[in-house]
Image (tube, rainbow, N blue to C red):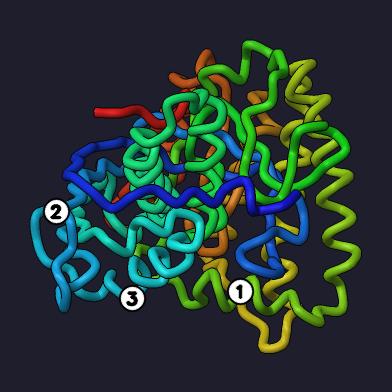
């Protein structure tokens, strides 16, 4: 797919203000390893979350010569440590919307969840910012469809954070070309026109905070470790196969297959990190204790509780809404002891971003 269709040059004129709220997401099939400019080596699919969101407001004003490209507030405070990532994002997207060079952006952002809490805050943050910029561009497109707008937003979000491409709509988004989803591609994520089984409509995600500290390995470094990784070709092939199989489980409501595939994907991600050069062990003893407890509970009770992991120590517990009461009782009694000060976040599958 050519990226030329995403280039739009509008005149630099006037003032515009907008505000968007974008959710985080949790990948079920993981993408790990990228090429080119933020393109995935393998496809992925994720649940769009509901409660863990970033709300971002942006005002666009004509930029005077010699002034900065943007200012940024996080929780109403100046946060200069975020500036390099925002600047990199603006540098990457300006070729696709050159008029941005003529504007100063005043950006204000806040999360509904603690930063560095085990939820992908970069995904929701970059998606919210990309939606604001796409909304600004939209005023110059008299014939822009909703689909075209969302595609551009996902395309821009990807340039800030790969997983942000999947934080635009819901309840599930696919990013990366897969023969299982005819419209899927590497440039932006799609919400497939598929009738998912009702059991997944309000699927629950309880995040157990094992470690709140900053990740030992940045996403950029982690993805880079797949270059030359001895198992990379097999891993990319595995992800394609798993995505096709997971699609079937998500349509049929086969929870046993869903659990098997999503847990295998989580462990495969960590296996890649443990066998890279240099190698990293991101799970902690409490992570492993939780995984063991979850497996034992499922065996003993037959309840469809499963886990998934991002590239860190924290654990996402996935389960149907109708099982929430007994599973939350188990989490409180047996698992919160393994979390930092008992910290956890309750969320569920949602329907995507919205304009505020």
Where disc 3 sits, the SS reads: helix
For residue 74, the mark is: none
Q: Relative to 178, is 324 on the left or the right?
A: left
For residue 75, the mark is: 2
- Judged by depth in the image, the label closer to the viewer, 2 or 3, is 3
Q: CA distance from mark 3 to mark 1?
A: 19 Å
Q: Position of residue 316 (x, y in %)?
A: 52, 45
The answer to which of 43 and 88 lies nearer the viewer is: 88
Q: CA distance from mark 1 to mark 2?
A: 28 Å
For the residues labelled 3 and 1, say whether their Cβ atoms are less than 8 Å apart: no
Residue on which disc 3 sits: 84
**What's the residue at 43%, 43% (across, down)?**
24
Q: Residue furthest bottom?
A: 278
- Quick one: label 2 or label 3, which is nearer the N terminus? 2
The answer to which of 189 and 46 lies nearer the viewer is: 189
For the residues labelled 2 and 3, say whether their Cβ atoms are less than 8 Å apart: no
**What's the residue at 48%, 66% (across, down)?**
92
Residue on which disc 1 sits: 222
The answer to which of 86 and 24 lies nearer the viewer is: 86
Q: Position of residue 66 (x, y in %)?
A: 16, 78
């Amino acid at each position: 797919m050519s990226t030329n269709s995403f280039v739009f040059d509008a005149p630099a004129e006037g003032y515009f203000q907008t505000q968007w709220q974008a959710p985080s997401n949790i990948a079920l099939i993981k993408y790990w390893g990228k090429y080119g400019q933020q393109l995935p080596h393998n496809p992925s699919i994720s649940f769009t979350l509901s409660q863990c969101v970033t709300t971002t407001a942006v005002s666009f004003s004509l930029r005077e010569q010699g002034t900065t490209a943007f200012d940024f507030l996080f929780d109403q405070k100046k946060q200069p440590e975020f500036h390099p990532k925002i600047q990199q994002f603006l540098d990457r997207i300006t070729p696709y919307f050159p008029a941005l060079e003529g504007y100063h952006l005043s950006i204000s952002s806040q999360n509904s969840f603690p930063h560095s809490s085990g939820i992908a805050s970069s995904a929701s943050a970059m998606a919210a910012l990309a939606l604001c910029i796409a909304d600004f561009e939209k005023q110059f497109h008299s014939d822009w469809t909703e689909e075209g707008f969302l595609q551009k937003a996902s395309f821009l979000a990807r340039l800030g954070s790969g997983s942000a491409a999947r934080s635009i709509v819901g309840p599930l988004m696919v990013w990366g070309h897969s023969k299982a989803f005819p419209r899927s591609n590497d440039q932006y994520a799609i919400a497939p026109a598929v009738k998912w089984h009702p059991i997944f409509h309000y699927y629950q995600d309880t995040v157990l905070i094992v470690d709140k500290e900053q990740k030992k390995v940045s996403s950029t470094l982690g993805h880079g470790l797949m270059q030359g990784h001895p198992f990379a070709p097999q891993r990319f092939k595995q992800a394609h196969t798993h995505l096709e199989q997971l699609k079937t489980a998500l349509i049929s409501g086969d929870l046993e297959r869903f659990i098997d595939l999503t847990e295998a994907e989580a462990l495969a991600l960590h296996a890649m990190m443990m066998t890279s050069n240099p190698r990293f062990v991101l799970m902690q003893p409490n992570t492993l204790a939780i995984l063991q407890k979850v497996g034992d509970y499922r065996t003993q009770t037959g309840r469809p509780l499963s886990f998934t992991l991002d590239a860190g120590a924290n654990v996402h517990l996935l389960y149907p809404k109708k099982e929430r009461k007994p599973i939350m009782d188990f989490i409180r009694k047996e698992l919160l002891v393994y979390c930092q000060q008992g910290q956890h976040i309750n969320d569920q599958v949602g329907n995507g971003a919205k304009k505020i």
